[in-house]
Image: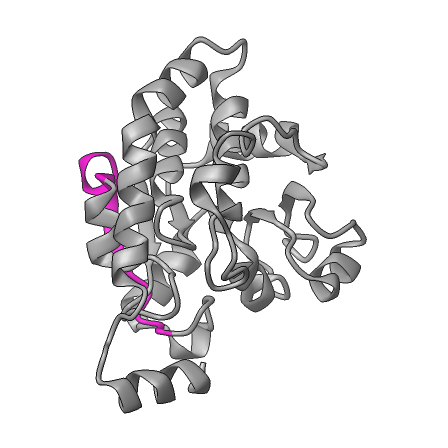
């Protein structure tokens, strides 16, 4: 985190990934109608939306600067989950009244929107408080149209993850009160996997360290419940 803050300080550019983020969001919005049609016509729309949202986590110029959006979009949605605790997720969702969705990268925010549409319950959508790498901010969430279907909030944290000690009191209260938390991406997994809240981690595993922690191979697509949850 300090490296990126130093870069911002030296260059005077608060959000060096801004144009890339907007390009990603614009591209995903251009195929949003087709993706929505595939979801709504699927045998299980909720499962398909979860799969698309997880696969969208591959859109990460922070973890992979060589990511080729145009090239990879041709095949990105063909892959299935490598591990998926879908029945547990559905059970939790059916009981949930307070849902918190913690965002990861801009661009994949469009896929988050498709998933929230299938959740069909009120959702609070949490983003970073300030630009950090290509993580989603309030501006990025609005660009993707999340304000149309969810309440957008800031976590108060400007790290590439959700470090609770750096989060606002308002966010920590929402986090504590939530009875279902969807945590998107590897950065959020790294910072929240030791917590005891009812969290479902939805992500692509991008490094060997996290792969070993989860006991799964790198590049896996997963939906798993927090093993420390009470």
| Image coordinates for residue 201, horizontal then vertical, percent | 57, 48
Q: Nearer the viewer, residue 124 or 36?
A: 36
Q: Magenta region: which residues?
A: 145-158
- The answer to whether residue 165 is visible is yes
Q: Nearer the viewer, residue 71 or 32?
A: 71
Above or below, 193 relative to 223: below
Above or below, 21 relative to 120: below
Residue 148: within the magenta?
yes
Horizontal side of residue 13 vs 69, given as left or right: left
| Quadrant assignment for the N terminus | bottom left
| Image coordinates for residue 60, horizontal then vertical, percent | 48, 55
Above or below, 122 relative to 102: above
**Number of numbered callouts drawn:** 0
- The answer to whether residue 124 is visible is no
Horizontal side of residue 228 vs 92, given as left or right: right
Residue under the image location 34 percent in, 46 percent down:
24
Residue under the image location 41 percent in, 53 percent down:
102
- The image quadrant that residue 195 belongs to is bottom right
| Image coordinates for residue 89, horizontal then vertical, percent | 58, 34
Above or below, 46 relative to 18: above
Q: How is the image coloured?
A: one colour
Residue under the image location 39 percent in, 48 percent down:
100
| Image coordinates for residue 94, horizontal then vertical, percent | 48, 27
Horizontal side of residue 195 vs 179, given as left or right: right
Residue under the image location 65 percent in, 42 percent down:
222
- The image quadrant that residue 133 belongs to is bottom left
Q: Nearer the viewer, residue 224 or 1?
A: 1
Horizontal side of residue 47 vs 33, given as left or right: right
Residue 8: within the magenta?
no
């Amino acid at each position: 985190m300090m490296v990126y803050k130093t870069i911002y300080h030296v260059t005077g550019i608060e959000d060096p990934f801004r144009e890339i983020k907007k390009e990603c969001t614009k591209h995903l919005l251009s195929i949003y109608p087709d993706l929505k049609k595939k979801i709504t016509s699927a045998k299980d729309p909720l499962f398909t939306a979860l799969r698309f949202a997880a696969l969208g986590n591959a859109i990460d110029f922070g973890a992979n600067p060589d990511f080729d959006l145009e090239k990879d979009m041709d095949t990105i949605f063909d892959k299935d989950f490598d591990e998926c605790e879908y029945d547990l997720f559905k059970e939790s969702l059916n009981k949930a009244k307070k849902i918190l969705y913690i965002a990861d990268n801009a661009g994949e925010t469009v896929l988050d929107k498709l998933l929230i549409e299938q959740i069909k319950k009120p959702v609070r959508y949490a983003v970073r408080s300030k630009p950090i790498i290509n993580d989603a901010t309030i501006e990025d969430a609005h660009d993707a149209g999340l304000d149309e279907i969810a309440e957008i909030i800031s976590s108060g944290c400007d790290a590439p993850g959700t470090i609770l000690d750096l989060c606002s009191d308002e966010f920590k209260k929402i986090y504590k009160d939530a009875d279902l938390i969807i945590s998107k991406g590897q950065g959020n997994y790294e910072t929240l996997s030791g917590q005891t809240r009812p969290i479902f981690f939805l992500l692509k595993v991008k490094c060997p360290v996290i792969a070993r922690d989860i006991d799964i191979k790198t590049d896996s697509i997963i939906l798993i419940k927090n093993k420390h949850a009470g």
